[in-house]
Amino acid sequence: MIDFKQVTKDLSEYFEKKSEYIEKARKNQKFKLQEKQDLSFVTNIDLMLHDALSEILSKYHPVIISEEGISASIKDQFWLIDPLDGTSEFINNSKDYSINIAFIDEGKVIYGWMGFPAYKEEYFTDNKKLYKKDSTGLQELVRPNIQESSDKLKVGLSLRQIDSMKKILSLREVSDYININIIGASRKYIALCLGEIDIYPRLGPTGEWDTAAGHYFVELLGGFFTNWDLSLVTYGKLDYKNQAFVCALSKRILEQGIMLFSRFIYLDTSED
């Protein structure tokens, strides 16, 4: 049995030690870039975090599936890591990047942790509760009040998604019913958990490491994270890829989003 409290403690100690260094690299644009085989970019910060997190987490379980490398063939239980979620945000000097970690047991997330160096915030799960840690201390996050009677849905999208989806978003049958909130990478899950947005629609595929921790956060607050046909999103697929998905804290809002966006699935080609 993994001691997730100790895992959180180890991750928090590393985060506090390295977050300022990571932030200086972003603000001063002092990092090295290289192109991956899929033509996306990786920085030396991604690789540094991959190595350090792999060392920390392998003490608790040896199988690590990371965007930047896989330690072993897939098992029923494994760590899922995105060392620097939102690399494009980081490269473009946006604060909305994070370190994402989850533990998977037979296809389901049972632990999640996110660190946001630019905001000096950590979010993590413990005993099926969600917590926020920052300079003011530790706070349990509870389900926010959800306004389901609003005429327009507050939709969380990144700039890259907006650019990729501009034809969709310009259609009156969509634009008349939404207000767009520009939020990068996994910050959208936090905005959803805090009640700052109503829904996050993802119309294209993502890596499992992009979503696992955020998925668990949303579910712990009573929300929904599903494929567009309302089937469950599971982890440990052969290619580590998710289909298009949608998440919201309210079933009614989820269904509204499906009515608005489902016919446009896979027209979003952004990588965020």
Image (tube, helix red, strand yellow):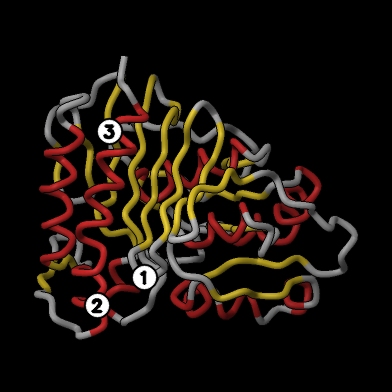
Q: Which mark is residue 26?
A: 2
In the rendered image, residue 249, in percent from the top left (x then y), is placed at: 69, 47
Nearest to N terminus: mark 2 or mark 1: 2
Nearest the viewer among 106 and 9 is 9
Could you tell me which residue is drawn at 58 percent across and 43 percent down?
A: 140
Q: Are marks 2 and 1 in contact (CB under 8 Å)?
A: yes
The image quarter in which residue 70 lies:
top left
Nearest the viewer among 247 and 134 is 134
The image quarter in which residue 115 lies:
bottom left
The mark closer to the camera, 3 or 1, is 1
Nearest the viewer among 212 and 234 is 212
Q: Which mark is residue 118?
A: 1
Could you tell me which residue is drawn at 18 percent across and 60 percent down?
A: 46
Q: Which mark is residue 79?
A: 3
Nearest the viewer among 158 and 202 is 158
Nearest to N terminus: mark 3 or mark 1: 3
The mark closer to the camera, 3 or 2, is 2
Q: How many marks?
A: 3
- Badge 1: few (under 14), some or many (20 or more) residues near its Cα, within 10 Å? some
